[in-house]
């Protein structure tokens, strides 16, 4: 178990119950307290995402219909500004503007950001923890319960364990863990590169022990 200190009390209770299920099934659990440097990872990964978004959008728009007049991220930004009353009424385009200023994919700065984010999340993150603590996998709540998005506060996240495997490109299996005030929450199994068969085995065994999946329903309100 790792990255579990910041979760709120209801989610932690579900997580502790899941750990007890695994313990009773014969798993040996190890507390991992030396979490990787998420802030540094996200700092470099943002540079990577912005550079790749600018390049990817340019490639995508290049194959768009002739009726589509915008061909680059710069064009999209200009269009949004020209139609600000409609396109920017509720949210700005700060990320677009930042991405437009990002380095191109053939620059040394982009390659350094990509290498650094991968190294911190993969070899010096997940791999280091697995080897240091002699683990088969890392387990943690997948993310917080679903949050409400609105036109005033926008969207927000209360935490996620998917950052490291997403940045490193490592396998990550999530299965139902339980519910928090009627909202489903998941349990993540995270491993090193090419460990998919083992992670699927662990996740499947947990599912069979708990049967925690909640049948989706359209509720009028939550408890």
Image: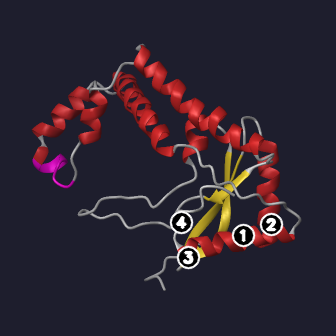
Residue at 37% of width from left, 18% of height from top?
A: 104
Q: Mark 2 points at which residue?
A: 22
**For marks 4 and 2 on the same chain, the one whose residue lies earlier in the sequence:** 4
Which element is circle 3 on?
Answer: helix
Which element is circle 4 on?
Answer: loop
Q: Per the image, is 112 magenta?
A: no
Magenta stretch?
85-90
Q: In this view, does 67 lie above or below 84?
A: above
Which element is circle 2 on?
Answer: helix
Task: Measure the alpha-carbon separation of dots 4 and 3.
Answer: 8 Å
Task: Measure the alpha-carbon separation of dots 3 and 1.
Answer: 13 Å
**For marks 1 and 4 on the same chain, the one whose residue lies earlier in the sequence:** 4
Q: Name the residue under label 1.
A: 18
Q: Could you say where residue 217 lies in the image, as x and y percent from the top left? A: 54, 76
**For marks 3 and 2 on the same chain, the one whose residue lies earlier in the sequence:** 3
**For marks 3 and 1 on the same chain, the one whose residue lies earlier in the sequence:** 3
Q: Which mark is residue 7?
A: 4
Residue count near mark 1 (Cα–Cα under 10 Å), binned few <14, some 14–19, many ≥20? many
173 horizontally vs 51: left or right:
right
Residue count near mark 4 (Cα–Cα under 10 Å), binned few <14, some 14–19, many ≥20? some
**Residue 212, visible in the rendered structure:** no
């Amino acid at each position: 178990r790792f990255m579990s200190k910041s979760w709120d009390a209801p989610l932690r209770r579900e997580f502790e119950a899941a750990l007890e299920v695994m313990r009773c099934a014969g798993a040996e659990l190890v507390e991992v307290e030396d979490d990787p440097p998420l802030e540094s990872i996200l700092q470099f990964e943002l540079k990577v995402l912005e550079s790749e978004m600018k390049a990817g959008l340019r490639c995508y728009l290049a194959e768009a219909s002739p009726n589509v007049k915008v061909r680059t991220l710069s064009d999209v930004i200009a269009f949004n500004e020209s139609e600000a009353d409609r396109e920017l009424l509720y949210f700005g385009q700060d990320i677009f503007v930042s991405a437009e200023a990002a380095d191109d994919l053939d620059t040394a700065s982009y390659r350094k950001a990509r290498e650094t984010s991968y190294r911190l999340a993969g070899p010096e993150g997940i791999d280091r923890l697995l080897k240091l603590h002699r683990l088969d996998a890392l387990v943690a709540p997948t993310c917080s319960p679903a949050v409400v998005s609105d036109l005033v506060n926008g969207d927000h996240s209360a935490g996620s364990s998917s950052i490291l495997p997403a940045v490193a490109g490592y396998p990550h299996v999530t299965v139902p863990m339980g519910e928090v005030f009627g909202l489903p929450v998941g349990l993540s199994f995270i491993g090193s590169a090419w460990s998919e068969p083992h992670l699927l085995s662990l996740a499947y065994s947990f599912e069979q022990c708990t049967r925690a999946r909640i049948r989706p329903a359209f509720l009028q309100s939550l408890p």
